[in-house]
Image (cartoon, grey):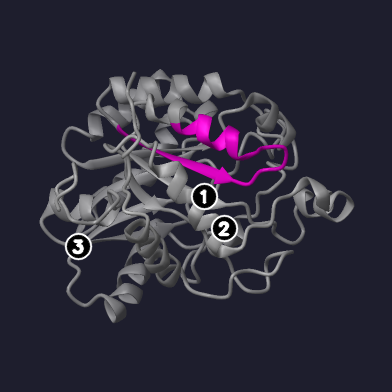
């Protein structure tokens, strides 16, 4: 059976999207450009979001002390060992807020990446309160010739949750940034955390309807992972009853429920996250993401369901 996105996979995989668009596998190269965040330097707040520790996101070859081009070179060399046939790459600026600088500084960072051999585009992770018309116009111009994605940290659609995790902005800010990006022809991605304290299944089900109405192209889901040394780790120590600890099976069954209601036009980049074994406060699932993904696909088959099966645009 072919699903609305043109493959027999039961969800719209981001990997499949890239193959459809570029005709071959495309590999992401994570880059740390040394940005900070307005929620750390005092512009919006201090201490950052309560769950945040960027050590959980960066591979070993990343260091903001290295020029972007050096990180790209090392990243390509690293991935050649595993994916020898890959010839196209996307530079992924992930750590902190990668539009949090004057436009002229952003140009100095992104132009060398876009000119690097075999790099066909960039994915820029940022906060929705770290873009403005000038910055969006710049990325819109780049998007005429290159693959450009602005990936926004959404995390939750509930203002009470955003306030509780010290996010520093409301959901309307998120909505506005995504809509303004899409209006300019920029591809948009979003990141959601499932399991934030105070939220229940009904909240996540409602979130699927809210998200599905946004002009998103890609979406990532991560289960909440409590990282040692964060403010959330202290909250967990003092009030563990506020946190839901999913087994892998529970989480994947929940994700199946959720994506049944998700817009089938959204390509899904991840359905779960993974961190180093010694980084989490709680015991992890103990298996690699590719094994998690295989179990997820098996559940979809067992339940004879797929992304968007219960989606309604009304």
Q: Secondary structure at mark 2?
A: helix
Contact between labelled residues 1 and 2, with CB atoms less than 8 Å apart: yes
Q: Which residue in the protein does label 3 denote?
A: 25
> For the residue carrying disc 3, how many other residues have a C-alpha within 10 Å: few (<14), some (14-19), or many (20+)?
some
Q: Residue 50, position in %: x, y? A: 72, 44
Which sits in the foreground, 284 or 2? 2
- Label 2 to label 3: alpha-carbon separation: 31 Å
Tag in front: 2 or 3 = 2
How far apart marks 3 and 1 lie (CA) works out to 29 Å
Q: Position of residue 205 (x, y in %)?
A: 51, 35
User: 184 above or below 201?
Assistant: above
* Image quadrant occupied by the C terminus: top left
- Label 2: which residue? 250
The answer to whether residue 94 of the structure is visible from this angle is no
Whether residue 44 is visible = yes
Closer to us: mark 3 or mark 1? Answer: 1
Q: Nearer the viewer, residue 309 or 263?
A: 309
What span is colored magenta in the figure? 187-208
Q: Is residue 103 above or below residue 179?
A: below
């Amino acid at each position: 059976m072919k699903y609305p996105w043109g493959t027999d996979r039961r969800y719209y995989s981001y990997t499949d999207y890239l193959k459809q668009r570029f005709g071959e596998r495309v590999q992401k190269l994570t880059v740390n450009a040394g940005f900070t965040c307005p929620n750390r330097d005092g512009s919006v707040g201090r201490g950052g979001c309560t769950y945040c520790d960027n050590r959980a996101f960066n591979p070993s070859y990343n260091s903001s002390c290295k020029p972007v081009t050096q990180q790209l070179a090392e990243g390509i060399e690293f991935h050649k060992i595993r994916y020898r046939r890959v010839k196209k790459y996307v530079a992924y600026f992930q750590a902190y807020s990668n539009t949090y600088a004057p436009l002229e500084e952003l140009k100095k960072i992104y132009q060398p990446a876009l000119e690097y051999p075999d790099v066909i585009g960039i994915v820029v992770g940022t906060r929705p309160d770290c873009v403005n018309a000038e910055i969006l116009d710049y990325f819109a111009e780049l998007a005429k010739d290159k693959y450009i994605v602005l990936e926004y940290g959404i995390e939750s659609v509930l203002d009470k949750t955003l306030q509780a995790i010290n996010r520093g902005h409301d959901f309307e800010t998120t909505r506005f940034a995504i809509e303004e990006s899409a209006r300019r022809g920029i591809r948009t991605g979003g990141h959601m955390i499932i399991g934030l304290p105070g939220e229940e299944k009904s909240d996540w089900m409602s979130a699927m309807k809210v998200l599905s109405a946004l002009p998103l192209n890609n979406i990532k889901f991560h289960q909440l992972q409590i990282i040692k040394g964060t403010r959330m780790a202290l909250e967990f120590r003092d009030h563990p009853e506020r946190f839901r600890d999913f087994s892998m099976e529970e989480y994947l069954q929940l994700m199946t429920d959720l994506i049944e209601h998700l817009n089938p036009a959204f390509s899904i980049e991840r359905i779960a996250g993974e961190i180093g074994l010694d980084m989490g406060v709680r015991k992890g699932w103990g298996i690699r993401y590719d094994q998690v993904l295989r179990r997820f696909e098996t559940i979809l088959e067992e339940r004879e369901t797929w992304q968007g099966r219960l989606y309604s645009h009304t």
